[in-house]
Image (spheres, rainbow, N blue to C red):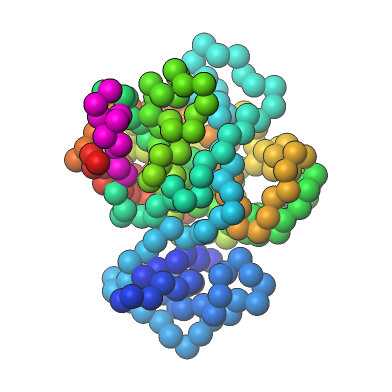
Amino acid sequence: MKYTRFKSGNNINWGEIIDDEIVELTDNFINSGSSRTNTSHSLSDVELISPVTPGKVVAIGLNYKSHLGDKPAPAVPEPFYKLPDTIIGPGENIVIPKEAIAEKVKMQPEAELCLVMGKGGKRISQSDALSHVFGYTCGNDVSARDWQQNDLQWWRAKSCDTFTVLGPWVETDFDPGGAQIKCRINGEVVQNQNISDLLHGVPRIIEFVSSMITLNPGDVIMTGTPGKPKDMFSGDTVEVEIEGIGILSNPVINE
C-alpha cells in the first residue's frame, strides 16, 4: 500500500493512494487510529508533498562498497543527522545556497533507500527490526562536497534548506533486500546499484542506531548511497528511482 501527504486547495491531508486516486485519511497513517474517509481525489488534481514529518532523520554514510573509493569499510554503520525542517517532497525545488554558488562548491545528489519507522523502540534486535518499519520511500541526500570535505562538521554540507528530499510516497509492500536503486540527472543514469550491496543492511542499521538513541514512530533512516554521484547544477532535474517504490523527481535552482 502507498501512503503520502498532499495538498488540495489550501488544505494539507494524509492519504492512501489507490490506483489513480488518493483517499483522504483521518490522521497520520503512522498512527494506528488512522482510517479512510469518504473523500477521495484524482491524483492529477492534487500536489504530493513530503510523505512524512519525522521527528528526526538519521542518515548512514559510506554504506556501499561502490561509494567507498579508497576508504576502508566501516566496521559499524556510520550515522549522521539531517534536520527535519530541511525536508522537501516531490516536485519541490532543490535550492543551491548563494554561498555555495559564490564559492563554486560542488553539488551532488545521493539516491537512497529510506526507512520510515512505524513502531518505536530502544535496542531493537536485528531479528525484530523489520517489524518496526512502517514502510519505505525514496530519498535524495543532497550534498555540498567541498563543505563536506573541509568543514569540521557536516551541518551545512548535508542540512541546508531543501537538502533532504523524500517521496513520492511510503510503500509498505516492499522487500529491502534486492531492489535496484537509480539516480538520473536530466534523464542520464548516474547511479545504478542493487540495494543488496549495502555494507550494513536494514536490520543491522536499525539495531545499531537504536542501541544509542530511541527511535520513534515516523522517524526516517536514510541508508546510504551507491557509486560515484555526479555534479548537479541549476536547471537540472534529478530523479531517484527505487524499483518497487517509485520515482522522486525534483528540479534544481540557484538561490
Residue at the extreme bottom of the image, as rendered: 38
Residue at the extreme top of the image, as rendered: 70
Residue toward you, 174 or 156: 156
Looking at the image, residue 90 lies above or below residue 31: above
Numbered circles on residues, count: 0
Q: Quadrant of the C terminus?
A: top left
- The percent position of residue 134, horizontal first and vertical second, equals 63, 59
Asked if the stretch drawn in magenta spans residue 95, the answer is: yes
Residue 159 visible to an observer of this rendering: yes
Left or right of 94? Residue 181 is right
Asked if the stretch drawn in magenta spans residue 153, the answer is: no
Looking at the image, residue 161 lies above or below residue 69: below
- The percent position of residue 202, horizontal first and vertical second, equals 65, 41
Please give the name of the residue rendered at 47% of the width and 51% of the height, measured from the top-left corner. 85
For the record, the magenta segment spans: 94-103
Please give the name of the residue rendered at 24% of the width and 26% of the height, measured from the top-left corner. 102
Residue at the extreme left of the image, as rendered: 235
Residue 20 visible to an observer of this rendering: no
Residue toward you, 126 or 236: 236
Please give the name of the residue rendered at 45% of the width and 66% of the height, measured from the top-left corner. 5
- The percent position of residue 100, horizontal first and vertical second, equals 30, 29
Q: To which quarter of the image does residue 123 belong? A: top right
Left or right of 16? Residue 74 is right
